[in-house]
Image (spheres, rainbow, N blue to C red):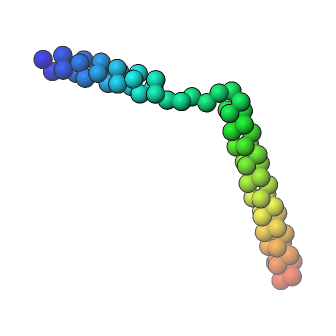
């Protein structure tokens, strides 16, 4: 009995999932390409900001250390 209920609930879940997936509005190729480009550009910009901050911080620490002779 318990296995029958499990199978029934599994089947029900699959039918409901299929029904919900039919309602999804999937993006077209142009939208996917545009969004991918945006993500790559933002990632590159954030990476550049982190690299610049790291370079400035490292230079400042080296300058401070050279002033105090450490």
Q: Is 18 rendered above or below residue 57?
A: above
Q: Nearer the viewer, residue 38 or 23?
A: 23
Q: Nearer the viewer, residue 26 or 3?
A: 26
Q: Residue at x 23, y 18 (%)?
A: 8
Q: Position of residue 69 (x, y in %)?
A: 85, 81
Is residue 40 found left or right of 14 in the rendered image?
Answer: right
Is residue 2 found left or right of 52 in the rendered image?
Answer: left
Q: Residue at x 74, y 39 (%)?
A: 37
Q: Nearer the viewer, residue 59 or 20?
A: 20
Mark count: 0
Q: Position of residue 50 (x, y in %)?
A: 75, 58
Q: Residue at x 78, y 69 (%)?
A: 57
Residue 34 visible? The answer is yes
Name the quadrant of the N terminus. Answer: top left
Q: Is 69 rendered above or below residue 3?
A: below
Q: Nearer the viewer, residue 6 or 17?
A: 17
Q: Residue at x 77, y 52 (%)?
A: 45
Q: Position of residue 35 (x, y in %)?
A: 69, 39
Q: Is 57 rendered above or below residue 47?
A: below
Quadrant of residue 9 in the image?
top left
Residue reaching furthest left? Answer: 1
Residue reaching furthest bottom? Answer: 68
């Amino acid at each position: 009995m318990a296995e029958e209920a499990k199978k029934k609930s599994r089947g029900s879940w699959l039918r409901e999932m299929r029904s919900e997936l039919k309602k999804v509005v999937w993006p077209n190729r142009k939208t996917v390409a545009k969004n991918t480009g945006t993500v790559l550009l933002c990632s590159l910009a954030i990476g550049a900001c982190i690299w610049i901050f790291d370079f400035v911080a490292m230079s400042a620490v080296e300058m401070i250390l050279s002033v105090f002779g450490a």
